Amino acid sequence: MAEAESARAVRACEARNDALTEPRLVRLGIIALAVAFLTVFIVLPLVLVFAQAFREGIAAYIAALADPEAQSAVVLTLTVAAISVGLNLVFGLVMAWAIAKFEFAGRTLLISLIDLPFSVSPVIAGLVFVLLFGAQSALGAWLIARDIPILFALPGIVLATTFVTFPFVARELIPLMLQQGTQEEEAAISLGASGWRAFVRVTLPNIKWGLIYGILLCNARAMGEFGAVSVVSGHIRGETNTMPLLVEILYNEYQIMAAFAVASLLALLAVVTLVVKAVLERRLAEGRRQRDH
Amino acid sequence: MGLTLTWLSLIVLIPLAGLFIQTADLSPAEFWAIVTSRRTLNALKLSFGLSLAAAATSLVMGMVVVWALVRYRFPGRRLFDAIVDIPFALPTAVAGVALTALFAEQGWLGAPLAALGIKVAFTPLGIYVAMVFISFPFVVRTVQPVLQDLEAELEEVAVSLGANRWHVVVRVILPSIAPAILTGLALAFARAVGEYGSVIFIAGNLPNVSEIAPLLIVIRLSEYRYADATAIAVVMLAAAFLVIFVINRIQRRAQARAPAL
C-alpha cells in the first residue's frame, strides 16, 4: 500500500520534471548541434594554427620565430601593449573612480562614451588618427616639419591601440565600484585617512580581481589588434610591424608555416588569457559571495 | 573628473570629431556622389547584408549553444563554455588565416565541401563564415547570465497551471530573455559590420563582389583618397551609433519592466 503510494509519487515527480525540460531526443539533438558547431568553428581553427605551425618540425618552427623580423615584431608588440595597457590602467582607474564614487548629471552618457570604441570599426579607429596626424592635416604638417613622427611610427601604433582598448579596464571596474558604494571610503576618511590612503588601502583591495580581469582582457586585445594598427603602421619591415601585421605579411608571401608560427604565439596568448580569466572569474564569484554574507 | 573628460576627449572624442569635421569639408552633393558610387554602394551592401545574415545565424546558433550550456549537463560542458570566448581573445588576423586555411579548397573542411560543389574561401560565403565566427559569442554571453538567473518557479508555476513544455519555452522563457537576445543580436551585427582582420583573408576581396566596406576604407586611404575613406567611415559610424541607440532603448525598456516581475 505504502509502496504503491511512493511509486505513484515518484512517477508524478518524474512527469513534473519531464514538463520542466525537453524530450530526451530534443535534448540530445541540441547538445550535439552545440558541440558540433563549437568544434567546427572554434576547436578546428585553433588546432589548425598549431598543426600548421609545427608541420615542418620543431627546428623549422624555432627558426621561423628566431628570424630578426619576427623578433622585432615581438618586441614592438610587447612595447605597444605595455604602454597602452599602462595608460588604460591608470586612466581606467581614474574614470571608474570618478563615475562610481561621485554623483553628477550625465553619468550614463559618460559611461556610453567610454564604451564607444567597442562600437567603432577598428579600421575607422585607425582612420581617425590618419586624418588627425597625416601630412594633409595642419597638425600633421606641423609635426612633420618638426620631425616628430606620429604615423607610421610607435606613437601612432600606441594611440590606435589605446583607442581600441580604451573601455576594458573602466567597464570592468564601474559596476564593481558602483555596487560597493562609498561607505567604506567614507568610514576610512572619517577615521582620519587621507583620500589617497583610503584609495590604496580600501578601494584598491576591494576591486583587485576586477582590475586584474580588466588588465588581462585589455592586454589580449592590445597585443592582438590588427585593423586599427594596420592603418597607422605603414608596414615598415623590421620597424613598425607588430605580430598580427607580420602574420598577414608572411601569409601573403606564401610563407605559410612562418605565418602560422607567429600566429601560434598569439593563439597561445589567447588560450592563456582564457585560462587565467576562468581562474579570476572564480575569485570574483567568491569575493561576491563573501560580501553577500 | 576633469582628468576623465580630458583623457576621454584626447583619445576618443577629438579623433572621432575630426572625422566629422573632415566630412564637413565635402558638399552634400560630393558626399552623396561618393557614397552612391557603384563600388562603395556594393561594398556597403555586402557589409550590411552579410552582417545581417551572420547576426541572424549567430542568434540561432548562439541560442542553441546557450541552451545546451545552461540547461543541460554533458561531458566537456565547462570546457566548451570556456572556449566560446576564443573569438574574443584570438587576434583577428590569426582567426582570419586559420579560417582561410580551414575552408580553402585543400583545407580540412574546404576539401569535403569542394567535393559537394560548395566553395567557401574567397567568396562572399567565406565572409559570412568569418562574421558568424566573430559575432556568435556576443549572443551567448549576453543571453547566458539572464537565462541562468531565470527563476525556476516561473516555469514550475506555468507547468502546474497545465502548460506543456513548448508553451513554457515560448510563453514564459522567451519573453523573459528577449531583451538580452535583442541586445546580443545588435552587438553581433555591430561587430560583424566593422570586422576587418578575420574577414579580409577569407574574403577574396574582389571589388563589387567580395569587398567589404572596412577594406574599401583601407584601399581609399592607401590611394590618398581621404574624402572617400572618410565618407564611407561616416556611413558606417552612423550605423554603429544607431545600434548603440537601439541597445540603450532595449535595455531601458527591460529595466522599466523588471520591477513588475
Image (cartoon, coloured by chain):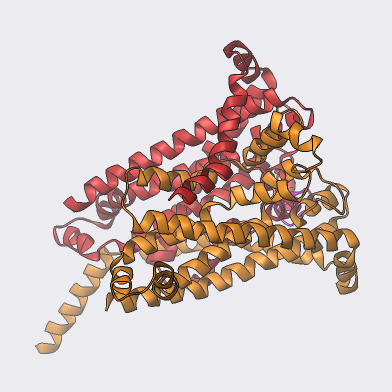
Taking the image as shown, residue B178 lies to the left or right of residue B68, namely: left
Q: Residue furthest bottom?
A: A2
**Can residue B119 be seen?**
no
**Residue A51 at x, y = what percent?**
77, 66
* Residue B194 among magenta residues: no
Q: Nearer the viewer, residue A287 or A62?
A: A287
Left or right for B180, reference A140: left
Q: Quadrant of the C terminus of chain A?
A: bottom left
Say which residue appears at 35% left-offset and 42% top-offset.
Answer: A106
Name of the residue lying farthest toward the top: B29
Farthest-out residue, left = A1
Image spot of residue A128 (x, y percent): 64, 36
Image position of A130 with respect to A283: above or below: above
Q: Nearer the viewer, residue B177 or A105?
A: A105
The chain coloured red in the image: B
Residue at 39% over, 37% down: B246
Q: Nearer the viewer, residue A252 or B68?
A: A252
Q: In the rendered structure, which segment of residues is drawn in magenta? A: B99-111
The hue in which chain A appears in the rendered picture of the protein: orange
In the rendered structure, the answer to whether residue A45 lies left or right of residue A208 reads right
Residue B109 shown in magenta: yes
The N terminus of chain A appears in which quarter of the rendering? bottom left
